[in-house]
Image (cartoon, grey):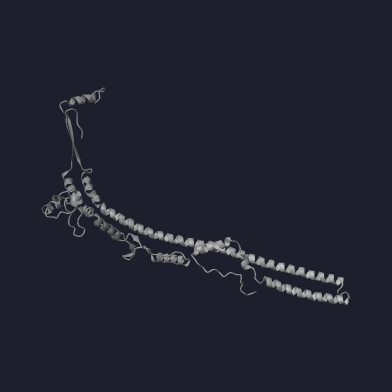
Amino acid sequence: MAGAANPRMAAPAAPGGNVFQQAAGLYGQAAAGPNIGQFMNPYTSQVIGRTGMDMARQAQIAQNQLGAQATQAGAFGGSRHGVAEGTMLGDYGRAFGDIAAQQRQAGFNTALSAAQAQQGIQSGLASQGFGFGQQIGQQQMQQGAMQQMLNQQLIDAARAQYAGFTGAPQQSLGLPMAAVGAGNMGKRTQTQTRNPGPFDFLSLGAMLNPFGGG
Amino acid sequence: MSGGGKGGKQTTQVTIPAWLEEAARRNIAKAEDISQTGFVPYMGPDVAAFTPMQQAAFQGTNQAASAFGLGTVDPMAGMPPAQNFGGVQGYSSYPLYNQAIANLQATAPGQFAALQAPFINPQTRAIPGAPYMTGAQLAAAAPAAAAVPIVDERNFYGRGGGDY
């Protein structure tokens, strides 16, 4: 009993699969409910049997004493002796039944508590394992994104350079055009020459006529 | 500039002062020369490389994944080898650019030649051929132009060999 290995206690499962598979397994075990049988003391029946044997021996001793008393009273084998012996054995029987029931209930309650505790641990480990896996996955994704972004920056830079090469002829037009424009900018002299024709007085009259269009 | 009245004429003339005209000519000639420089690619680093500490973090994540049975790869797989630029670890886009230019030259040599034609030779500084040479270059090269082998891009522009 004490210190001995519990033959009903299953050996811990060897870790297999990745953290998600292990977490899923633990979750399934926790969801299945507390495994009480795993924690039931396999020696309970032996303990109860031993208790029964002890009580039977005590009952035998009590029966002998009762017989001796009945003999002294000259009542051995009589009806009163029979009633007393029956009552005494009945008491022992009920007492043994109570003790056996208490022992079995105590064993069940202990196993239930242990199984519920294990269920809680399984549930916690399942959640923890899933969280670990998620965190690692996210970190891998984040680091991969950093590397992909770096590669993308290189590609973008190369594309910009390529655009610079292919656009260079067009770009080269800008400087001479700017130079041509700069040659005229704000540095010009404007001369107006007016050569009125022989009938230009008509337009003058039209301008002076308040009713006419001009 | 607008017409005057019937039979009349109005002319607006724009004249450039002589002192400015000469300067403008020089400026335009200089601009034309400069415009023949051509594209100068940047060959230095564009992006800083991951530091050793970052690489250690990658490795740590890898080891954590391995410990929990998750898939792992070499953390730096898929990354080009970082180069040393004056003590700075970095990546340059120049090799990618160079490859793209080489692909262009291989697959579209006519376009490639046309894109380079307006510019000086990057190695020898030789001036571009007609019709891109300008001013004094064109005049100086005119006698020799006839002797210059006809380059492929003449067909690209639909010009005869005489233009070159």
At 45% across and 61% down in the image, what residue appears? Answer: A139
The reply, left or right, for residue A120 in relation to residue A74 is: left
Q: Nearer the viewer, residue B155 or A201?
A: B155
Locate residue A132, reporting x and y percent. Answer: 49, 63
Which residue appears farthest toward the left when viewing the image?
A: B143
The reply, left or right, for residue A63 in relation to residue A137 is: right
The reply, left or right, for residue A145 in relation to residue B140 is: right
At 87% across and 77% down in the image, what residue appears? Answer: A72
Q: In the rendered image, is residue A106 in sight?
A: yes
Q: Nearer the viewer, residue A171 or B164?
A: B164
Q: Nearer the viewer, residue B84 or A65?
A: A65
Q: Nearer the viewer, residue A174 or A213?
A: A174
State the quadrant of the N terminus of chain B.
top left
Relative to B134, say whether A111 is above or below: below
Relative to A143, say whether A66 is above or below: below
Looking at the rendered structure, the number of numbered marks drawn on it comes to 0
Which residue appears farthest toward the right when viewing the image?
A: A74
The answer to which image quadrant residue A77 occupies is bottom right
At 82% across and 72% down in the image, what residue appears? Answer: A85
Locate residue B107, reporting x and y percent. Answer: 25, 55
Locate residue B95, reporting x and y percent. Answer: 29, 61
Relative to A99, say whether A155 is above or below: above
At 47% across and 67% down in the image, what residue appears? Answer: B67
Q: In the rendered image, is residue A123 in sight?
A: no
Locate residue A118, reporting x and y percent. Answer: 59, 65
